Image (spheres, grey):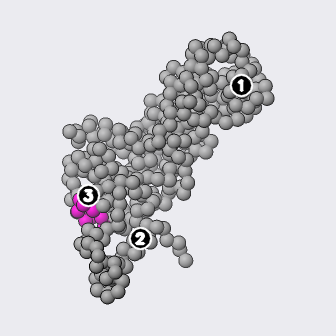
Amino acid sequence: MKKLTPAQLRYLILQETKDLKTTNSPNLATLLFEQGDTTDDAAFIDVTTKTNIADLGGADAYEQLVSGDENAPLIQAMMNATGWANGAIAKAGGADAIKKWAESVGKESLTNRIEKVGAALPNTAPAKKDMPALEGEDAAAVKDALTPGGKFNVDIEASYAADKEGLDAWLDTLSDEKKKEFEAGKQPEPKEEGLVREDKYPRHGMNAMPGGGADPVGKALAFLTKGKYDGDQGDDNIDVKVGGSLANSAMIPTQSNILAGKSLLFAFLQGTGNTDLSDMGGAFVTSAGEILDGHHRWSGAYIGTGGGLTHDNVHIVDGNADELIPMLTSIGNALGNPQKESRENRDDLVLERWHRLAGLND
């Protein structure tokens, strides 16, 4: 027997109660409807701006989208997904345009796209506060930190200096003169001091990585340059493709919560030519396709195009998310970017910039 998701169960209950209401069943139908609003609007499953798309039934979503009723909960969630959403939807034609777009995609296709996005989300995922706080403009510095020969080079290999684990333990082995150079924002002259690597990347936030910024000093600078002091100038190397391209269908979400209203907002605007989700805004993605930033652009593009969009302005880091997230989080800290509780605003800013360029915002 197939196990139902919460969204599927709610949809079945909705359909059963609609049938009971239609046939005037004297028992359960009366209990369900005699105290409540019996209008068609009340039959829609509740959706808010916080509803996870994994909890949204695709068939019910379609019914709300084609209702043409701007008071339908899903359409309200779309209209309130961001500060600019209501104006963008209005300029695109409002609830009637949403209805026409959904009908043009078709019930089966749109239902399948919504449910495929929900099914792709992992059951568990790192908290947003534990995800890298990197911006698109950080890509060059990240590439420099992960590849030898530049200003930075994070230590990646697995041996330890002086049998000491951790960045702090390594710093304690350095002379006062070298420590002062790091504090002044200078790098001591590299020389062979044995292979070095911290057991864990320094965790997390500015308190754990003082001195972070565009011109790091102290501990942040030491972390970013430690790979230069392990006696091997070519071993610490992870490829970063800055400004690459990647098919939407090749991307894999790493977050377990993607907002339904925002995803459908982006999908509608993409599907009607009122936004362009091909630009990922400098989002970071692993070479395995795992999304580290830009989940709503990905989900909106998938629903809007069926995965048939190619994204550009993607920074692709070689490796997998489990290995890269701690490293990239620490690099972000060292570059002056503490974690944020939410990265949703990045999606908003990218789309708002496009709307402004397209003349869609006041």
User: Which residue is identified by label 2?
Assistant: 10
Name which of mark 3 and mark 1 comes first in the sequence: 3
Residue reaching furthest bottom? 26
Q: In this view, does 77 lie above or below 338?
A: below
Q: Can I make out residue 167 in this image?
A: yes
- Look at the image and tell me in which quarter the N terminus lies: bottom right
User: Which residue is identified by label 1?
Assistant: 170
From the viewer's perspective, is the residue at label 3 or at label 2 nearer? 2
Residue reaching furthest right? 163
Q: What's the residue at 40%, 75% (across, down)?
A: 13
Q: Classify mark 1: residues with Cα within 10 Å, few (<14), some (14-19) or many (20+).
A: some
Name which of mark 3 and mark 2 comes first in the sequence: 2
Q: Name the quadrant containing residue 157.
A: top right
Q: What's the residue at 36%, 74% (across, down)?
A: 14
Name which of mark 1 and mark 2 comes first in the sequence: 2
User: Which residue is identified by label 3?
Assistant: 98
Q: In this view, does 4 lie above or below 288?
A: below
Q: Label 2 sits on what residue type?
A: Arg
Q: Name the quadrant containing residue 40.
A: bottom left
- Front residue of 214/267: it is 214
From the viewer's perspective, is the residue at label 3 or at label 1 nearer? 1
Q: What's the residue at 73%, 34% (across, down)?
A: 158
Q: Label 1 sits on what residue type?
A: Trp
Question: In the rendering, at what x and y percent does residue 108 appear?
Answer: 37, 67
Q: Main secondary structure of the magenta part?
A: loop
Residue at mark 3 to residue at mark 2: CA–CA distance: 24 Å
- Look at the image and tell me in which quarter the C terminus lies: top left
Q: What stretch is highlighted in magenta?
A: 63-72
Question: In the rendering, at what x and y percent does residue 18 appear?
Answer: 32, 78
